[in-house]
Image: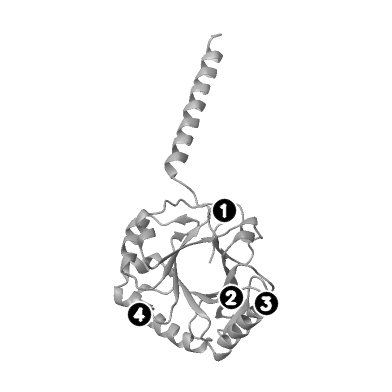
Amino acid sequence: MGARPAILLVTKAVFLLALGALLAASAAAAGPRVQAADYDAFWLWAGVRGRAELAAAKTIYLHSGEIGPDRNGFVRMKAQGVTEPGPHKATLWLVYRVRSLDWPPQIVAQIRRRLEAWRAQPGPVAGVQIDFDAATRGLQNYAAFLRALRRELPESCALGVTGLMDWASQASPEDLNALAGSVDELVFQTYRGAQTVENIGAYLARLGRLRIPYRLGLAEGAEWSPPRALAQRPNFLGYVVFLRNRGASIAQ
């Protein structure tokens, strides 16, 4: 009877050692994580606190507004993110989260005024990015919307869009390349929630057919192993990291 506590202690110690080894192996198998310090382009969404990495950023995609129906069904813009333009070192893209493409004329006028206000400050502003989850089967209609928007923006204003990884796997080359001519840059979101989508390599393999310059959007903290072939693709421009507060999930 007196030996039983000692046996239990040994058994518990062996269990804890085995558990520690298992957790270490799982962490090693998970692969590298996206660390903001390793990149120089970021999405800065409303509500995300300032970070040291932003001081050295070359490009910031700045959440500037939400466009969609209000409670009465009227499509309006709601300002988001940094409300007062100011001096900046990084090149800025003003990002608008869009929930409806049925825009009244004042929406574009508001975007133009915001663009002018930022360009009046010291620092470069590349243009406007539209963040809209267009269904793959609706890409032709989305392309028509973007062509019309392109005509309403200043010639010096670049137009970018975010893209879903489903576009890469399900859309025809004709649908994707219909965005060419009006879109200067496409940033594919490689994540759902805060995790990289499964079988990401299969999606990326299909991007070689694109004629549009594109980047890949990464979720901070998500697993990511850069495919070697990407660096050789002429239209691949690099990465954009979606910053988030510690412990927070990504919500768009």
The amino acid marked with disc number 2 is: Val
Residue 91 location, quadrant: bottom right
The amino acid marked with disc number 4 is: Ala
Instruction: Out of 71 and 10, give the one closest to the viewer.
Output: 10
Which one is earlier in the sequence, the residue at label 2 or at label 1?
A: 1
Instruction: Out of 5 and 165, give the one closest to the viewer.
Output: 165
Q: CA distance from mark 2 to mark 1?
A: 23 Å
Numbered mark located on residue 178 in the image = 4
For the residues bearing labels 2 and 1, Cβ distance under 8 angstroms: no
What's the image's color scheme?
A: one colour
Which one is earlier in the sequence, the residue at label 4 or at label 2?
A: 2
Residue occupying image coordinates x 42% and y 74%: 134
Q: Which type of secondary structure does the marked residue at label 1 adopt?
A: helix
Which one is earlier in the sequence, the residue at label 1 or at label 3?
A: 1
Residue 9 at x, y percent in the picture: 55, 18
Left or right: 183, with 4 as reference point: left
Number of marks in the image?
Answer: 4
Q: CA distance from mark 2 to mark 3?
A: 9 Å
The amino acid marked with disc number 1 is: Ala
Which one is earlier in the sequence, the residue at label 4 or at label 1?
A: 1
Mark 3 is surrounded, within 10 Å at the Cα level, by few (under 14), some (14 to 19) or many (20 or more) other residues, namely few
Numbered mark located on residue 37 in the image = 1
Residue 158 drawn above or below residue 46:
below
